[in-house]
Image: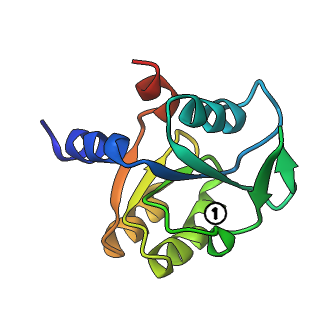
Amino acid sequence: MDKIDAVKKKMLEKKKWVVVGVTEDKTRYGYKIFKKLKETGYTVYGINPKYSEIDGDKIYSSIKEIPEKVECVNMLVNPKISLKILEDIVDEGIKYVWFQPGSFNEETIDKAEELGLNIVFYDCLYVELGR
């Protein structure tokens, strides 16, 4: 088992997640992943400053607003936004970040590794949850 597979396995065992880039657009992965995490028994919080709620769930503007400690972050935003949020993730004591395809670039991955985060990238959380 390679390092990313080991991190992926550990992350899927964690029960408190944040989805950065949640959306009310049911065709987008920001919606699908948020719902799939909830359906499969995870506690999940959504981050998107454009919304105050989606389907009755409170949506937050930043990770710092989440009312309890979470264990994992799923990124569904532009790499520039992902990069900016990494410091907040570390400040909140979160150790695991799953970058969805399109949410990272070399700079983002380098920074996440430099900050000591356990990361998964290239793989899709939605696909993993459906297995």
Identify the colour scheme used: rainbow
Residue 82 position, x and y percent, is 58, 61
Q: Is residue 90 left or right of residue 74?
A: left
Q: Secondary structure at mark 1?
A: helix
Q: Is residue 53 left or right of residue 17?
A: right
Farthest residue, direction left: 1
Farthest residue, direction bottom: 91
* Towards the viewer: 51 or 28: 51
Q: For mark 1, what is the residue? A: 80
* Towards the viewer: 67 or 86: 67
* Towards the viewer: 74 or 12: 12
The image shows residue 122, relative to residue 96, as above or below, that is above
* Towards the viewer: 113 or 31: 31
Residue 6 position, x and y percent, is 20, 43
Q: Quadrant of residue 29?
A: top right
Q: Residue at x 42, y 75 (%)?
A: 93
Q: Residue at x 26, y 48 (%)?
A: 7
The image shows residue 88, relative to residue 54, as above or below, that is below
Task: Give the quadrant of the N terminus.
Answer: top left
How many numbered circles does the render carry?
1
Q: Quadrant of residue 106?
A: bottom left
Going by the numbered disc 1, the residue's amino acid type is Lys
Q: Residue at x 63, y 75 (%)?
A: 64
Residue 62 position, x and y percent, is 70, 69
Residue 42 position, x and y percent, is 50, 41
Q: Residue at x 65, y 63 (%)?
A: 81
Q: Residues within 10 Å of mark 1 (few under 14, many from 20)?
A: few
Q: Quadrant of residue 51?
A: bottom right
Task: Give the quadrant of the C terminus.
Answer: top left
